[in-house]
Amino acid sequence: MTAIMKFDFQNPYPTTRLPVFARNIVSTSHPLAAQAGLRMMQKGGNAVDAAIAAAAAMMICEPVSNGLGSDAFAILWDGKELHGLNSSGHAPAAWTVEHLRGKYGPDASKMPKRGFDSVTVPGAVAGWVALSDRFGKLPFADLLEPAIDIAERGYLMPVVVQQKWAAATPELQHMPGFAESFLPWGRAPEVGELFQFKAAARGLRAIAQTKGSALYGGEIAQAIEQFAAMNGGGITAHDFAAFKPEWVKPIARDYRGYTVHEIPPNGQGIAALMALGILEKFDLAGLPVDGADSQHLQIEAMKLAFADVYRYVAEPAAMEVTPAQMLDDVYLASRAKLIDMKRAQDFGAGNPVKGGTIYLTAADEDGMMISFIQSNYMGFGSGCVEPHFGVSLQNRGHGFSLQPGPNQVAPGKRPFHTIIPGFLTQGGQPVMSFGVMGGNMQPQGHMQTLVRMLDYQQNPQAACDAPRWRFNSGLEINVEQQMNKATLQALSERGHKVDVINDNYQDFGAGQFICRAGDPKREGYVAASDSRRDGLAAGY
């Protein structure tokens, strides 16, 4: 890249973003995607049209996190009621335990992390079509125009995306189709360099012209089947043709006078609801917001929730307990009693029977709000990219197990999922669409930001920018470098194994929030976009 001036793009100073106010608004982790959404609104479209256009653009602008081979979930307020969409794909018909152990050995217990045996059927594009058919106003093909234009003309590489791109390259550079698609000039693009993805433009155009059927059994699916077969994979065009998104009723739990909504399993959104249900037994507002007591309680509540989620959550038909049992108030009260304010603990699962991702959100002046998330899972997903149509395939199959249990792999089964959109209501009316991306950070981010807003009345951007922690396993937590030093010391003294991370972009997720400020036609919305990404909240 030839530059007039040379810069160090690592900013050593904290940057404060301010909330954005507008009657029509889109918040995403890349500015071009937010603009794509606004273009649809200005063309006469609604929040759903904007979200689909932004989601398509995100596949081009942030391919480290999502692509045409992603899954998706959404929670939508249509102006009268709340709807949930589970558009996560299923395992190929060839994925029996016997078949996979025949390839990886009789004692194999885990699914591959990368390659075609981590690729489940992608559901995101089918989710776009389902949302457009039921709630959109504009023709579906119009919604993909901005993404096609960005893919054809290219865009200049932003800072955070470039960091993630470069970090993933050593592991993935030899995966099928990866270098051809994502390593122009034999390397990852540098900050400010022009990246074009003409193959993905071709794929998007075929999807636009066929309203998605090219991917679900048509020419793109057939190309993927052939590409998979060349590289040892068993996914077929028939697997794609068999996929259908599912409309679901969000699960919910009250917290501090509001109701928090999440998509039901096979996703992990229930973890945020369980943690909040545990925290409701404590007077958090009476504790300093950034103090050790408040943070300790939140960490321990999250650990208790994860212990149950990792034990029980799977495809609903395979679960041993129901979400209602896991969210039972008496059960959560019993879990809350296990918290010791003086020491950190490594919790096991209870017994409820007794009792890489992008997130975006859009809202319009007619009151429609959508909370939308799509993901290729780990950075660049499987690493496999069908080269003619630019389909970067997810690695959600890694979430299956080869061992007996709720998440044991089976043909047509959906894996445990990490991506979760969130929504907040009060008295049956919409308050906020929100989400925090980043693997198991997502329910942790939901809980931490909601506590800041509902217990401590911090505005969405402040709650977004505040320092976060991330629970990993056992007693281990990562914390951002900005966290209060006295709090870190106190947490360590209670037994938390604290690892301070100096790179906020890698471990702590990134959120987007749109909150109603009153009547959408008069007071509009207040929105936030996380400073941990290249994002933008934009409106008019």
Image (cartoon, helix red, strand yellow):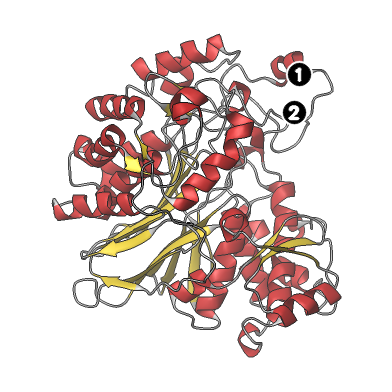
To which quarter of the image does residue 105 belong?
A: top right
Label 2, secondary structure: give it: loop
Comparing labels 2 and 1, the label whose residue is closer to the camera: 1
Q: Residue at x 49, y 80 (%)?
A: 458
Q: Is residue 500 visible?
A: yes
Residue 161: % across, % down: 47, 47
Q: Nearer the viewer, residue 279 or 150?
A: 150
Label 1, secondary structure: give it: helix
Q: Does 228 sit above or below residue 407?
A: above
Q: Residues within 10 Å of mark 1 (few under 14, many from 20)?
A: some
Q: Quadrant of the C terminus?
A: bottom left
Upstream in the sequence, badge 2 or badge 1? 1
Residue 517: % across, % down: 31, 77
Residue 162: % across, % down: 48, 45
Residue 220: % across, % down: 37, 19
Q: Residue at x 15, y 55 (%)?
A: 42
Please report contact status of discs 2 and 1: CB closer than 8 Å, yes or no: yes
Q: Residue at x 67, y 79 (%)?
A: 484
Q: Which residue is mark 1?
A: 104
Q: Quadrant of the N terminus?
A: top left
Residue 190 is left or right of residue 169, and the answer is: left
Residue 88 is left or right of residue 76, and the answer is: right
Q: Does 441 sit above or below residue 463?
A: above
Q: Which residue is mark 2?
A: 402
Labelled disc at residue 518: none
Q: Is residue 356 visible?
A: no
Task: Give the spatial CA distance, label 2 vs label 1.
Answer: 10 Å
